[in-house]
Amino acid sequence: MSAQPIYLTKERLNELEADLTEMTTKGRAEIARKIAEARSHGDLKENGDYDAAKEEQGLLELRINKIQATLSRARTVEAGDYPNDKVYILSKVKLKNRKTNKTLEYLLVSEEEADFEKNKLAINSPVGRALLGKSIGEVAQVKVPAGMTEYEILAISR
């Protein structure tokens, strides 16, 4: 069974590639320098600097592996790839919460790019899943911890 693709904007793909390059070159070199310096202090059994550097190395390698896995499954998407008739990834959606009458605006993105503080909502979140495929005027029902919430789609744009 192959892994699901991860949809990214070109900008996010470029950020991840730059981060990976930074970590595999400068990051690894800096860790190697710290390990070498700690080794020069003598007995490794009671050397806190050595232990800390090895721990840092392990965390760096985990981050590198995570980014490599993401990039191996990445597919780039652009807003122009999809029409404005329904909610798709990279749709800007204006919603009205039918319980509170509050108006909300979200950009639907991949989980990798989601940032609630910037109103970037993951398409695989409960609200994102409920909105996908809906048109203007339709109501999306979302089960949340407090019960069911309904969002009416007021506008869709790119």
Image: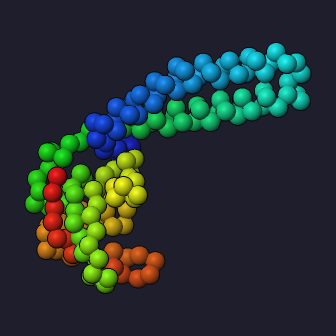
Residue 93 in the image: state x and y as whole percent. 22, 62
Vertical comparison of 12 with 93: above or below: above
What's the residue at 11%, 56% (across, down)? 84
Q: Which residue is drawn at 28% across and 56% down?
A: 108
- Asked whether 22 or 131 is in front, the reply is 22
At 10% from the left and 60% from the top, the residue drawn is 85
Residue 152 spot, x, y in % from top left? 21, 75
Q: In this view, does 33 lie to the left or right of 42?
A: left
Q: Looking at the image, is 67 positioned above or below residue 136? A: above
Q: In this view, does 59 lie to the left or right of 136?
A: right
Res. 32 visible in picture: yes
On the rendered structure, is 54 left or right of 114?
right
- 84 or 68: nearer the eye? 84
x then y, percent, for residue 154: 16, 70
- Name the quadrant containing residue 157: bottom left
Question: In the displayed structure, would residue 86 be above or below residue 101?
Answer: above
Quadrant in which residue 77 is drawn: top left
The colour scheme applied to this rendered structure is rainbow
Residue at image point 22% right, 57% down: 92
Residue 65 in percent (x, y) is at 52, 33
Q: Quadrant of the image for the N terminus? A: top left
The answer to whether residue 122 of the structure is visible from this angle is: no
Labels in figure, total: 0
